[in-house]
Image (cartoon, rainbow, N blue to C red):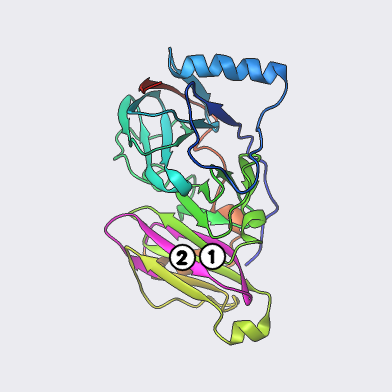
């Protein structure tokens, strides 16, 4: 399968430290500040005040990462589509939903950080708050895909977790949290295991791996497991190698695909699609991954206003 060159997303990433935030644990590597300089720090201070005041405004495509003080917290949202991800200790996802319009969410009390992604203005009006519910409904072209591939850019929100389009990545070896926007291939190049959480409604999953050690590859150095879903027999594409396979999926809710290889393969992508695998096979043949999985927000227009309520000092 052809690969498209990396495309800049124009996404803005910020780490916001709220007053009274306490980190109960320390990373093995020292944390990196995402924004530097007096002017940037003044902007952060103003944004901190807005978060718990009249609300922080995020334009379409913007991503912010907030470190939370002790809760309980409620998040009030207004505007267009948004993705809200609450992370606990070790990057555990306690909440990961896409939603639109005026909403009031209770943030789990165990959450230590909160990621907000402004997705832009959706075409539809009613969406069930869930992982990838808007991304899987409003892709710009058919077949509609969620997930990631090596040349795509993802939003790293912890040392073990990144947010992809309508999906969530988790890996095995912790990485320093530097720039929020990173290329997925830079992450997967140093990992042996990648777990990808995908939304309900995905009917087929494309798993892509490159063989880097033919001997280990022939010895079966590739393990693929599904949690919360049943995978059918993979479909073979004309002209594709055995390192790319399309699996039919049966799942009632969100599910996860974990791919592991110690040395035989490099994991290059996991994409989930709406529709049946048998119908998708012809559409996927010869398509560039960048064409299958667009980057950035749903559109260039729209914004959200986010306000935190509650909390303890």
Q: Is residue 25 visible?
A: yes
Which residue is tagged 2?
Answer: 258
- Residue 267 drawn in magenta: yes
Q: 118 and 288: which one is in front?
A: 118
Q: Quadrant of residue 39?
A: top right
Query: Does residue 242 lie above or below 308 as drawn?
Result: below
Pointer 1 residue: 193
Q: Which mark is residue 170?
A: none
Magenta-span inclusion, residue 141: no
Marks 2 and 1, the one that precedes in the sequence: 1
Q: Decide if residue 17 is on the left or right side of residue 29.
A: left
Q: CA distance from mark 2 to mark 1?
A: 7 Å
State whether residue 282 appears in this view: no
Q: Which residue is at the front of the view, 265 or 121?
A: 265
Image coordinates of residue 206 in percent, x first then y, are: 49, 65
Where is residue 147? Give x, y as percent.
Answer: 49, 54
Q: Residue at x 67, y 41 (%)?
A: 8
Residue 204 sits in quarter: bottom left
* Residue at the right extreme, as displayed: 37
The residue stretch that appears in magenta? 248-275
Q: Secondary structure at mark 2?
A: strand
In the rendered structure, are the residues bearing label 2 and label 1 in contact, judged by CB atoms less than 8 Å apart? yes
Determine whether the residue tagged by mark 1 lies in a helix, strand or loop: strand
Residue 188 in the image: above or below residue 36:
below
Predominant SS along the magenta part: strand
**Residue at x 61% of width, y 31% of height:** 12
| Image location (x, y in percent) of residue 90 | 47, 48
Q: Quadrant of the N terminus?
A: bottom right
Q: How many marks?
A: 2
């Amino acid at each position: 399968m052809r690969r498209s060159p990396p495309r800049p997303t124009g996404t803005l990433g910020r780490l916001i430290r709220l007053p009274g935030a306490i980190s109960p644990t320390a990373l093995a590597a020292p944390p990196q500040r995402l924004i530097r300089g007096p002017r940037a720090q003044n902007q952060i201070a103003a944004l901190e005040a807005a978060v718990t005041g009249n609300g922080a405004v995020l334009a379409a495509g913007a991503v912010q990462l907030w470190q939370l003080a002790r809760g309980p917290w409620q998040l009030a949202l207004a505007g267009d589509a948004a993705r809200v991800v609450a992370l606990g200790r070790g990057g555990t996802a306690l909440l990961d939903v896409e939603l639109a319009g005026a909403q009031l969410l209770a943030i789990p009390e165990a959450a230590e950080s909160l990621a907000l992604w402004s997705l832009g203005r959706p075409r539809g009006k009613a969406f069930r708050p869930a992982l990838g519910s808007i991304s899987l409904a409003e892709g710009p072209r058919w077949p509609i895909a969620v997930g990631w591939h090596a040349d795509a850019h993802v939003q790293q929100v912890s040392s073990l977790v990144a947010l992809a389009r309508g999906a969530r990545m988790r890996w095995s070896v912790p990485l320093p949290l530097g720039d929020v926007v990173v290329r997925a291939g830079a992450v997967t190049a140093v990992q042996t295991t990648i777990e990808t959480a995908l939304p309900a409604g995905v009917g087929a999953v494309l798993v892509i791996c490159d063989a880097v050690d033919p001997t280990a590859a022939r010895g079966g150095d590739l393990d693929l497991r599904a949690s919360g879903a049943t995978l059918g027999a993979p479909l073979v594409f004309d002209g594709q190698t055995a390192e790319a396979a399309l699996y039919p999926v049966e799942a009632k809710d969100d599910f996860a695909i974990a791919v592991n290889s110690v040395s035989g393969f490099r994991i290059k992508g996991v994409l989930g699609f709406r529709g049946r695998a048998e119908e998708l096979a012809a559409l996927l043949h010869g398509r560039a991954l960048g064409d299958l999985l667009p980057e950035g927000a749903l559109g260039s227009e729209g914004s959200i206003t986010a306000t935190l309520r509650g909390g303890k000092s």
